[in-house]
Amino acid sequence: MVHRLSVVVLICLFAGSLAGAQSQPGDRNEVINMLPAGQQRTPVKVEFAEGFAVSPIARATIFVRDLDESLKLYRDILGLKPWFDNYWKGPGINAIMGTEGRELRATVLRSGDAAFGNIGLYQLYKEDGMAPQPSQRNDTRTGDVAVVFHTTEIDRLTAEIVAAGYAMISPPVVLMPRENMLVQSREMMFRDADGVLVNLVQSGIPKAP
């Protein structure tokens, strides 16, 4: 039997190295909460299976060109809810990113109260010049990165994604028909505003025994 150790932790933007940097005398770190007053992050339970040094993935973080534009997809269409939204300044944030003189707005979105599988949308400020225009190819290639969500509303979401003009890779398709299914599983894929692949999967319905 796998033994699980449960600890209650407050998921911070970065690991303890950044928190330590913030507390050092003489630093000029600043964190501005961008969420409405009174919205506080809640502690979450993280489980570590015995024999594993790390937890399941906490989140996928995308460094985006325009955070407000990215929220139109992940928040407004896909329906994820902001968990925290902070603007970071100072040497601590630059230390973890390997940068100098940058500032960062970091928004993390989640579905429900899950401790894992969240999406981070981070936008860098005070960069030199504009980031290169992301690829909006309608195929996939080595080096692409995809985030995957399960859904029960694949047709509605696909219609909204198409209407919003995102680059489509595939409409909902059945990858492998199975005889024991009353309704087949389907999935679709498209690119977000920064060229990251997003894969939506809707599970099918098995036939009655």
Image (cartoon, grey):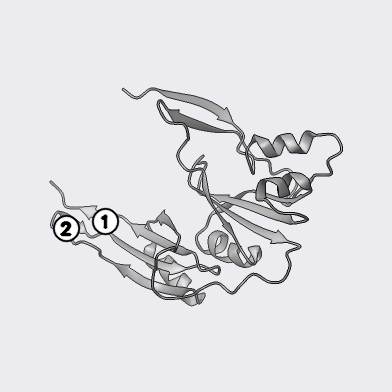
- Asked if residue 46 lies left or right of residue 22, the reply is left
Residue at the spot x=39%, y=60% of the render? Answer: 200
Q: Position of residue 35 (x, y in %)?
A: 71, 50
- Asked if residue 207 lies left or right of residue 173, the reply is left
Q: In the figure, residue 24 lies in which quadrant?
A: top right
Front in this rendered view, residue 63 or 66: 63
Q: Position of residue 92 (x, y in %)?
A: 74, 44
Give the residue type at disc 1.
Gly
Neighbor class of circle 2 (other Cα within 10 Å; few <14, some 14-19, many 20+) is few
Front in this rendered view, residue 56 or 73: 56
Residue bearing mark 2: 178
Q: Is residue 142 above or below residue 119?
A: below
**Please, what secondary structure does the residue beneath circle 1 have?**
loop
- Asked if residue 44 lies left or right of residue 140, the reply is right
Dot label at residue 204: 1
Front in this rendered view, residue 7 or 55: 55
Q: In the figure, residue 152 lies in which quadrant?
A: bottom left
Distance from the alpha carbon under mark 2 to that under mark 1 = 10 Å
